[in-house]
Amino acid sequence: MPNADIYLHDALAAFDLSAPAAGVERFGQGHINDTYLVETQDRRHYIFQRISPVAFKRPDQLMENVVGITEYLSRELAETGGDTRRGTLHFLRTREGSYYYTDRGGSAWRTYPFVDGTVCYDTAETPELFAASGRAFGRFQRLLQGYPAQTLHETIPHFHDTEDRLVKLKAAVSADPLGRKAGCREEIAFMLDREADCSVALRALREGRLPLRVTHNDTKLNNVLMDEKTGEGVCIVDLDTVMPGLSINDFGDSIRFGANHCAEDERDLSKVSLDLHLFELYTRAFLEGAGGTLTDEEIAYLPWGAKLMTLECGMRFLTDHLEGDVYFHIDREGQNLDRCRTQCKLVSDMEAHWDEMKQIVDRCR
Ligand code: ADP
Ligand code: GN1
Ligand code: MG
């Protein structure tokens, strides 16, 4: 993979910023793109990103999606009295008029203003913050209700196809290119034991019990910017995987990441557990934000969304560990296996509290 920094200055020069760059630093905790915060000489701030070529094969299609979505959100916000400036991302054009710049190594770059007065959290510091993120993701889904789904490109084919994720894990186990299989037999067995679960939501979709909607598909807490004063969700970011999908997955991915008190790569598994109080708060907030757009059946499947997103993410971390950490950024060896282990622990915890999760969802209807 080319070193992103080599081309950063070319990328900066390619865009029509308000003034030349005065300072640049790496930014955020995202696992996929290379993100930088840029300050210009007129003291404005921009996010610069190299789109991951490993994750996204067609940056042209990806940018068409995200520009379409952000323009649509701007119009929806304008019509509903929302904040059009801070409520959505606004992509800038290059001097040549394109929304992305391709560097000499073949990678695509894009930029948009940093949303001022916002903070981003990697763990929910207070229950209120977590609830606010739920309202924001629910609202996001409601705002995109009327978006023409057929115009969206599939930026990552089979992204939340849990059955396919298991097939890919099995392939990585068989190939075992780095000889890491021996170090994770327990985790592999954990995933294989849950093969039947992988079909639950997909079967409901195939049978027409769950509808396909325009969904975000990556609803981690650190993909929503919170107002630093009020703590309310201001702007949903990381729109690269907005595609037709299941509402329960947007709900579930947030639970996976935020309804516990540990980092995704916590090594002390005794600390990792599902917090049912946070689960309830998020459920209420997400449904409130979604404002009646979810069907009864979707609501009934919310616990499955939580379990399946956690199981699937665990499989993805394990697959990447076996394949040599080619997809998710790591900063130490074994980090993807550690991430997989926290997901297994959370899945086990959900299984142990399954009836309570269902009762909570019923109470929140
Ligand atoms: P990745 O796909 O790698 O997760 P993101 O698009 O989520 O990349 O960006 C990484 C991080 O950068 C986010 O988690 C958030 O903290 C921060 N970020 C992204 N866009 C903005 C923005 N417009 N204003 C402020 N912070 C942002
Ligand atoms: C990635 O890009 P980021 O860090 O917000 C990943 C998600 C995973 C998540 C696990 C495009 O999210 O699907 O759930 O890591 N995004 C992509 O933390 O693969
Ligand atoms: Mg992100």
Image (cartoon, rainbow, N blue to C red):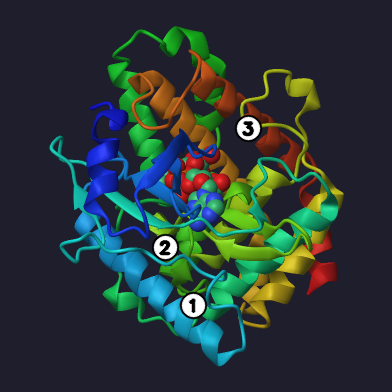
Q: Are marks 1 and 3 in contact (CB under 8 Å)?
A: no
Q: Is mark 3 within 8 Å of ligand 2?
A: yes
> Which percent across, then down, holds residue 8?
29, 37
- Residue 267 is left or right of residue 199, and the answer is right
Q: Residue furthest front?
A: 42
Residue at x 62%, y 79% (from the top left corner): 295
Q: Are marks 1 and 2 in contact (CB under 8 Å)?
A: yes
* Residue receiving disc 2: 242
Query: Of callouts 2 and 3, which one flags the residue occurring earlier in the amino acid sequence?
Result: 2
Mark 1 is on which residue type?
Leu
Element at label 3: loop
Residue at x 70%, y 68% (from the top left corner): 135
> Which percent across, then down, holds residue 102?
18, 47
**In the depicted structure, whether residue 86 falls above or below residue 280:** below
* Residue receiving disc 3: 264
Q: How many residues crowd mark 2 within 10 Å: few (<14), some (14–19), many (20+)? A: many
Between the residue at mark 1 and the residue at mark 3, the CA separation in whole angstroms equals 29 Å
Q: Nearer the viewer, residue 42 or 298?
A: 42
* Residue receiving disc 1: 144
**In the depicted structure, whether residue 296 falls above or below residue 5:** below
Determine which quarter of the picture holds residue 324.
top left
Residue at x 30%, y 32% (from the top left corner): 4
Mark 3 is on which residue type?
Glu
Q: How many residues crowd mark 3 within 10 Å: few (<14), some (14–19), many (20+)? A: many
User: In which quadrant will I find the C terminus?
Assistant: bottom right
On the question of residue 175 being in view, the answer is yes
> Which percent across, then down, holds residue 241?
40, 56
Element at label 2: loop
Q: Nearer the viewer, residue 219 or 3?
A: 3
Mark 2 is on which residue type?
Val
Between the residue at mark 1 and the residue at mark 2, the CA separation in whole angstroms equals 10 Å
